[in-house]
């Protein structure tokens, strides 16, 4: 039985797909499966996938009408049969030993998640925050999960996950029109609430290509990222309640992030940001400590100062 599955969900990724697939089938570990979900591409993506699948039977193709990459990833999660899995985007690629080193880290250390470092390609000079976002902030085996939240980036593709946790807790990518691009945040926050141990590798194993439509482009300029992170916390909070998880420190960090997001978002987004936060607090109030409610009151006062309530 294969040890790991690579999930590759794509829409119109023909331009860089061959480079990506070459890196996946060229992994130093051969005992794996590659689940490719073509989300209704209108270019040559499906044809390229079929050509590679004819040469390598480890490739599985799921072809569907365009429903969004998050839906495609959910389809892949439901079909997982290997103990571990990871994600890759069609415009990026793996280093040859990505799977080998990540598997070794998560298995040897009996961890729930392994995280590697990232090689950035593209214009980072005009986006210095990108370098800091992906800079290693913690290394080795960690078991103080709440401490990891501010030190862990929310992207999907530099991590290896345990399939057992996905099936046990029914973790997936919800279909929600109010979330624009924040499904990475949503999934990571929910998954990390289930972790007891995480291993951080020093190795740069994932090649990430910056573009104007990527994490660093128009998404951030519109500040929809901030709202998406709030929605991510909303889903994570509901997930914690549903499964009766003990995560008081997660609530504390959530409140601290709220204050930061509220302070740094444009005025246009301050009121909807506050309304979302207020709704979560009302729903989860009895589960939140006095210290965290104090942080929320700070946020509430900030809101009153701005809107003269």
Image (spheres, rainbow, N blue to C red):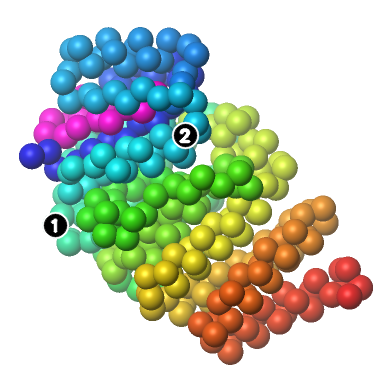
Q: Where does the image place residue 16, in percent across and percent down from the top left? A: 43, 18
* Inter-mark Cα distance, 2 to 1: 32 Å
Which residue matches tag 2?
69
Task: Sort mark 1 into few (<14), some (14-19) or many (20+) by Cα contacts within 10 Å.
Answer: few
Q: Where does the image place residue 166, in percent across and percent down from the top left? A: 30, 54
Q: Is residue 30 magenta?
A: yes
Above or below for 176 versus 143:
above
Q: What segment carries the magenta color?
A: 23-38
What residue appears at the point 50 percent right and 13 percent down from the top-left corner? 42
Q: Is residue 199 magenta?
A: no
Of residues 248 and 150, the one nearer the viewer is 248
Q: Earlier in the sequence, mark 2 or mark 1?
A: 2
Q: Where does the image place residue 274, in percent across and percent down from the top left? A: 73, 66
Of residues 282 and 212, the one nearer the viewer is 282
Q: Residue furthest left?
A: 1
Look at the image and tell me whether residue 114 can be seen: no
Which residue matches tag 1?
108
Q: Residue furthest right?
A: 308
- 297 displayed left or right of 71: right
The N terminus, quarter of image? top left
- 214 displayed left or right of 276: left
Q: Are marks 2 and 1 in contact (CB under 8 Å)?
A: no
Residue 201, numbered label: none
């Amino acid at each position: 039985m294969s040890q790991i599955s690579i999930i590759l969900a794509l829409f119109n990724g023909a331009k860089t797909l061959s480079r990506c697939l070459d890196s996946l089938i060229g992994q130093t570990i051969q005992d794996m499966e590659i689940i490719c979900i073509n989300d209704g591409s209108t270019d040559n993506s499906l044809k390229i996938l079929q050509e590679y699948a004819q040469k390598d039977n480890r490739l599985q193709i799921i072809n569907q009408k365009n429903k969004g990459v998050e839906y495609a990833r959910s389809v892949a999660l439901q079909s997982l049969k290997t103990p571990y899995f990871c994600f890759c985007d069609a415009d990026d690629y793996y280093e040859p030993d990505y799977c080998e080193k990540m598997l070794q880290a998560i298995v040897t250390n009996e961890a729930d998640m392994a995280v590697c470092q990232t090689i950035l390609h593209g214009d980072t000079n005009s986006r210095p925050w990108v370098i800091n976002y992906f800079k290693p902030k913690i290394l080795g085996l960690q078991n103080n999960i709440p401490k990891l939240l501010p030190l862990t980036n929310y992207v999907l593709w530099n991590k290896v996950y345990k399939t057992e946790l996905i099936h046990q807790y029914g973790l997936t990518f919800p279909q929600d029109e109010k979330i624009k691009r924040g499904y990475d945040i949503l999934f990571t926050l929910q998954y990390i609430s289930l972790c007891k141990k995480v291993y951080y590798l020093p190795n740069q194993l994932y090649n990430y290509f910056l573009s104007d439509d990527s994490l660093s482009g128009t998404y951030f300029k519109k500040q929809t990222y901030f709202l998406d992170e709030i929605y991510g916390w909303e889903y994570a909070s509901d997930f914690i309640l549903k499964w009766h998880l003990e995560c008081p420190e997660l609530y504390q960090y959530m409140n601290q992030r709220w204050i930061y997001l509220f302070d740094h978002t444009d005025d246009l987004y301050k009121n909807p940001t506050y309304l979302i936060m207020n709704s979560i607090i009302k729903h989860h109030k009895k589960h939140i400590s006095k210290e965290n409610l104090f942080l929320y009151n700070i946020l509430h006062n900030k809101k009153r100062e701005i809107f003269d309530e």
